[in-house]
Image (cartoon, grey):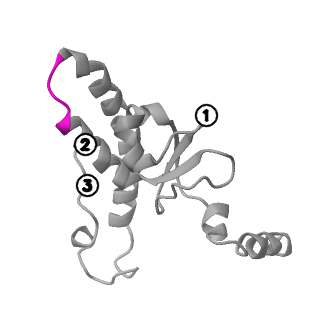
Amino acid sequence: MLLLLLPLLLLSGCTAGGLSRAFAGQSLTLNYDDFGPESMASPFLGPRGSQTVIIAHYGFNDLTPSGPEGVRYVNVLQSLTFLRQEVRSLPLSSANAPLRQRLRTTYARLYPLQLRRYNNALSGSFLQPFGGMDRRLMLPALPPSSI
């Protein structure tokens, strides 16, 4: 069995970021519209294509199409921060209520991924990876569960 898995590790490691893509962590597939209209989302997501798909994961933002045309990889924590900022910057009017609700729904879909990562980091063993250091001081602040 090990001999069968070894070529998989070697082949996926040949490309830049191939190993992390071969053993991807948790991710969530979203639509471009989940981040608002293009005028609002384009600074964060880049220009919209005909079939743009957004994949939120625990890596770096990759706004250039990689793989299939129009796929964008965005960081979960950066996505949560972007959504919070956009909701706070929207004027409080009845015309913005549907957009505000759509951004809040996207935030609510992304939040469990960040919460799970945060809890996994805190529940690790005392001996790994940071010794006796308090992990809460090293982790980014956990964003609020709703905006």
Q: Residue at x 35, y 54 (%)?
A: 78
The quarter of the picture where the C terminus appears is: top left
Give the residue pinned by disc 3.
Answer: 142
Position in image of residue 6 (x %, y %): 79, 75
In the picture provided, is 33 more to the left or to the right than 86?
right
In the picture provided, is 89 more to the left or to the right than 1?
left
Q: Nearer the viewer, mark 1 or mark 2?
A: 1
Amino acid tagged 1: Ser
Q: Is residue 89 magenta?
A: yes
Q: CA distance from mark 3 to mark 1?
A: 34 Å
Position in image of residue 37 (x %, y %): 39, 31
Ranked by sequence position, the earlier of labels 1 and 2 is: 1
Few, some or many C-alpha atoms within 10 Å of disc 2 (few <14, some 14-19, many ≥20)?
Answer: some
Q: Secondary structure at mark 3?
A: loop
Q: Nearer the viewer, mark 3 or mark 2?
A: 2
Amino acid tagged 2: Arg
Q: Secondary structure at mark 2?
A: helix
The quarter of the picture where the N terminus appears is: bottom right
Give the residue pinned by disc 1.
Answer: 50
Few, some or many C-alpha atoms within 10 Å of disc 3 (few <14, some 14-19, many ≥20)?
Answer: few
In the picture provided, is 6 more to the left or to the right than 114?
right
Q: Which residues are magenta?
A: 88-93
- Eyeballing the image, is 34 above or below 18? above
Q: Is residue 119 magenta?
A: no
Judge whether residue 120 can be spotted in this image.
yes
- Eyeballing the image, is 33 above or below 17? above
Give the residue pinned by disc 2.
Answer: 84
Q: CA distance from mark 3 to mark 2?
A: 13 Å
